[in-house]
Image (cartoon, grey):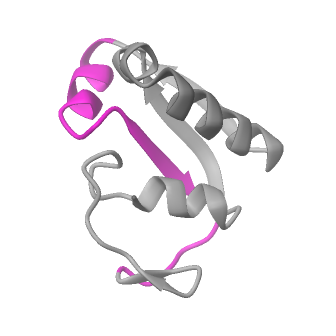
Amino acid sequence: GATRDALACRGVRELYITGGYLAEHIAEAEDAIRRALDQGAVVEQVSREAAARLDEHGGMAARLRFPTPATTFCGRALLPNTAAGGAA
């Protein structure tokens, strides 16, 4: 998905993740957090209303280090990603 692609391309400035995602996707969450920290990103576990809204879109999203065209990132086409709520 888009968030994983952004992590792979080292383009994440902030990674947002919910407790629900952590509980349901332990290995994937651990990998995403490790990748984010390895590139100097801030990792935030969101709660309350923000977590409820993010859980509706898969439980994980990112803010990018730099602006990108809406349709491409890291030389690849972006497709909407439920895990990222359509955000990269």
Q: In this view, does 40 lie above or below 20?
A: below
Quadrant location of the N terminus in the rendered image: bottom left
Residue 47 at x, y percent in the picture: 38, 14
Seen from the viewer's position, the closer of residues 6 and 66 is 6
Residue at x 23%, y 40% (from the top left corner): 57
Q: Is residue 11 above or below residue 35?
A: below
Q: Is residue 18 above or below residue 59?
A: above
| Viewer can see residue 88 | no
Q: Magenta span covers which residues?
A: 48-70
- Whether residue 54 appears in magenta in the rendering, the answer is yes
Along the horizontal axis of the image, is 16 left or right of 24? right
Residue at x 36%, y 58% (from the top left corner): 87
Residue 7 at x, y percent in the picture: 62, 55
Along the horizontal axis of the image, is 9 left or right of 59? right
Along the horizontal axis of the image, is 16 left or right of 1? right
Residue 13 at x, y percent in the picture: 65, 51
Seen from the viewer's position, the closer of residues 27 and 35 is 27
